[in-house]
Image: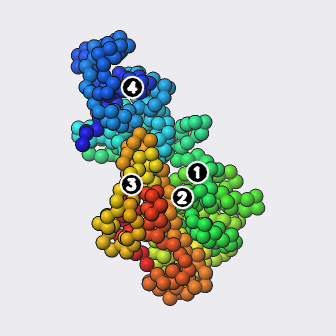
Amino acid sequence: MEADIMIDTYNRKYISSEMAWNYRILPYQRINDILELYIDEQLYTPSQKSELEVVLGSELRFIPMPSTAIEKALTKFYLNESSSSKAQQSVTEILNKNFVNELLQQAKGFGSSDIHIEIYDQKCRIRLRIDGKLIEKMRLNKRDYPALVNKIKIMAGLDISEKRLPQDGRISFSFAETKYDVRVSVLPTLYGEKIVLRILGHSATSVHLEELGFSELDLSRYKESIRRPNGIILISGPTGSGKTTTLYGTLKLLNKEGENIVTVEDPIEYTLEGINQVQVKEEIGLTFSSALRSFLRQDPDIIMVGEIRDTETASLAIRAALTGHLVLSTIHTNSAWGTISRLVDMGVPSFLLANTLNASVAQRLIRLLCTSCREKVPLEESIFPPSFKHKNVLANHYVAKGCKDCLYTGYRGRKAIYEVIPVESSVTDLILSNEKNVSEAFKERKITTLQDSAFELFKNGETSVEEIYSLLLNDQY
């Protein structure tokens, strides 16, 4: 298996993006007056070496590499656009002027949600979270790392002299004529400060429930639950499963002139015209529960609480639903039915849940296989968990391979899968009796579980078994 080519950020100044793609070369290092370059072994010729020595004004030494390794490194370290010629500036100039903005724009161009800037004993690196997974994008020289940290701190309005305590700030930037907010988190670690930049969308106008991944039946049930004038709708799932996006899609549908909608969030990830949004500030006592208490004096019709974290917030949300408000919120549980058990454990009486809960929804984000490179292979039963029941359904399945279109991850894009439990009379009885074994009742109600939805994506060739393995481990009900 061929080794991946790694490029130190310090050496990127020698070759522009345009030149790298044109000649299929990558900088390795400069030793004295000789610049060493990786080059596609299929394109190397003595005449090309002479041409490049004239263009670069330096004696060159070539290191031939396989075409696939060159293609992968070009995709990873250089944007394929002529505007990236700024990479020829010195590292000091880049750090002082454009590096952070270019990094943010590049991350957004790749569809990244987070940027991790990290320092270790022997190396510094920048990783991008793309489709939920971290991918190393570039290496930094350790001598440049403090300057980069200080630059980000200044942009985020943080204290550059404070290196012992965590700090949080915000940066704004524009990309493709759209404004974005960036949440900055600085954390002291053993070898220096680690920075995570979370790129937040500026507007939710492009979020539509119909495009998120609901099945036709689940979407119909969900819309029916939000049409009620009061009650509570809870969306569960781990961090990064798309719960907030679903909530914003819901608010966009409910956002009408005759409705007073208020939200309390941490952080505010999108903005919506016509909705009153409040940012949590725990350091001054503005928490989810204190904001929710104030909301009840603001004549609201619809309330969105970013997350139910404690008993007090849960009780206030239930009380708001009982007094004629429609409440939307999220909670961290593994399944839609698990949400009900969690609230009961938090001290919410079963009869209150049965009377106020409109719908309990669970969701996950599943990475989709890159259609440009996915590979069909024979199916073997051993790829499934031993406890999984539906093994003999396919002769073949698709696996991830990797190409330049998917940044060599094998996956491109994500799709949400849902489990929607509408609370009607039959489900109300289950809540009141605190029933644990609900599988038969759910089959009768044709409720699709997360496992069912995940396996459907697999059967359709949209994802791999590795991506849904954890959901196949056990039946949830």
Q: Position of residue 280 (x, y in %)?
A: 53, 56
Q: Distance of mark 3 from mark 2, alpha carbons?
A: 35 Å
> Which mark is on residue 376?
3
Q: Quadrant of residue 11?
A: top left
Mark 3: amino acid: Lys
In terms of sequence position, does the residue under pointer 1 or pointer 3 come before the other?
Answer: 1
Residue, disc 2: 244
Q: Mark 1 or 2 closer to N-term?
A: 2
Crowding around mark 4 (Cα neighbors within 10 Å: few <14, some 14 to 19, many 20+) is: many
**For numbered disc 2, what is the local secondary structure?**
helix
Q: What amino acid is labelled 2 in the image? A: Thr
Left or right of residue 168, residue 230 in this image = right
What residue is drawn where x is 38% and y is 60%? 396
Q: Which residue is mark 4?
A: 20
The residue that mark 1 highlights is 270
Seen from the viewer's position, the closer of residues 454 and 12 is 454
Whether residue 11 sits left or right of residue 317 in the image: it is: left
Q: Secondary structure at mark 3?
A: strand
